[in-house]
Amino acid sequence: MTKLIALVDGSIYAASVCEHVAWLAGRLGDDTPVTLLHVLGRRETQSAPSDMSGAIKLGARSSLLAELSALDEERAKLARKRGRAILEDGEAILRGAGVEAVTSRLRLGDLLETLADIEAEADILVIGKRGEAADFAAGHLGSNLERIARASHKPILVAARAFKPIETVLIAFDGGPSSRKAAAHVADSPLFRGLACRLLMVGAETKDSRRALEEAAYHLRHSGMETSVEVLPGQPETEIARIVEEGGADLLVMGAYGHSRLRALILGSTTEEMLRSCRIPVMLFR
């Protein structure tokens, strides 16, 4: 049984993340277990500094520290209360969509460290394109998304700002290991059954890439998916964006790293550009 972990915060993407999770669960079965995760950073719950510099008399300084400690303690309580409210709102969206197997986790600490602890429990991670700190920063990715995309070894669904019904899947294929893994997952997973598939390769074609493309197409069609194959000249960023903008896909599936890129340290440039510009959800594979 596929297990889902959804990262939610107080951003405008939180509701969309839950709606995308509801779609995933609906496709996989309403008994699909879902974990909603909200992580409080240490800054949100840290205590007052122990040292206050400056020419302040001892009595006044002690009184000030006591007030700061009380304020920080109250702030930490409010942060936890807000986190629980965010999780309750997410649960309400999921249960309203018929998803019953929902659990919530409120954790304190670093997001990546938290995910490293629980990622083994998940088959798919779901996150919004941007978090609270970047809600209105058009053209920018949330820092947490970039960190998770680099660190995680599980498929990641990056939710669009608003959920729309998904009927057509576009697989950006370059013949590399991560794109082959993405195509194989689409072919094998019940998540994509009954959806139309567009298998797209952009750029110079080689014998090896053509062979990999034909193998991927065969696997997709053999699984019962209606699959079209397209090979286009040009730059991947430009052609993929054009197809998406023209309404040619509802979900973009791609490898997180390009075939010819240095993959150990940075996201492939095409992937990063698609995450920045696409107004549809993107599913990434390592």
Image (cartoon, grey):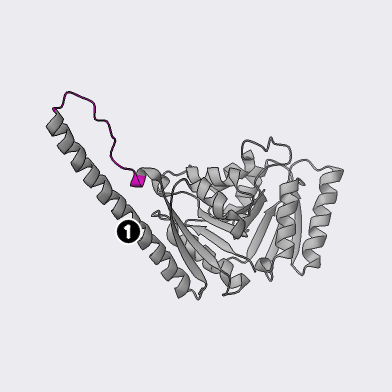
Q: Is residue 274 above or below residue 29?
A: above
Residue drawn at point x = 43 percent, y = 65 percent: 90
Q: Is residue 260 magenta?
A: no
Return the residue nearer the eye: 221 or 88. Answer: 88
Residue drawn at point x = 64 percent, y = 63 percent: 168
Is residue 237 shown left or right of residue 36? right
Is residue 233 shown left or right of residue 118? right
The picture quadrant where one finds residue 126 is: bottom right
Q: Quadrant of the N terminus?
A: bottom right
Residue drawn at point x = 27 percent, y = 31 percent: 51
> Tag 1's secondary structure?
helix
Dominant secondary structure, magenta: loop
Q: Position of residue 278 (x, y in %)?
A: 55, 50
Q: Position of residue 95 (x, y in %)?
A: 46, 73
Q: Is residue 47 magenta?
A: yes
Residue designated by label 1: 81
Q: Position of residue 180 (x, y in %)?
A: 75, 52
Type of amino acid under label 1: Lys
User: Is residue 164 among the parts visible in the rendering?
Assistant: no
Label 1, residues with CA under 10 Å away: few <14, some 14-19, many ≥20 = few
Residue drawn at point x = 48 percent, y = 48 percent: 111
Q: Position of residue 204 (x, y in %)?
A: 78, 40
Q: Which residues are the magenta region?
A: 44-57
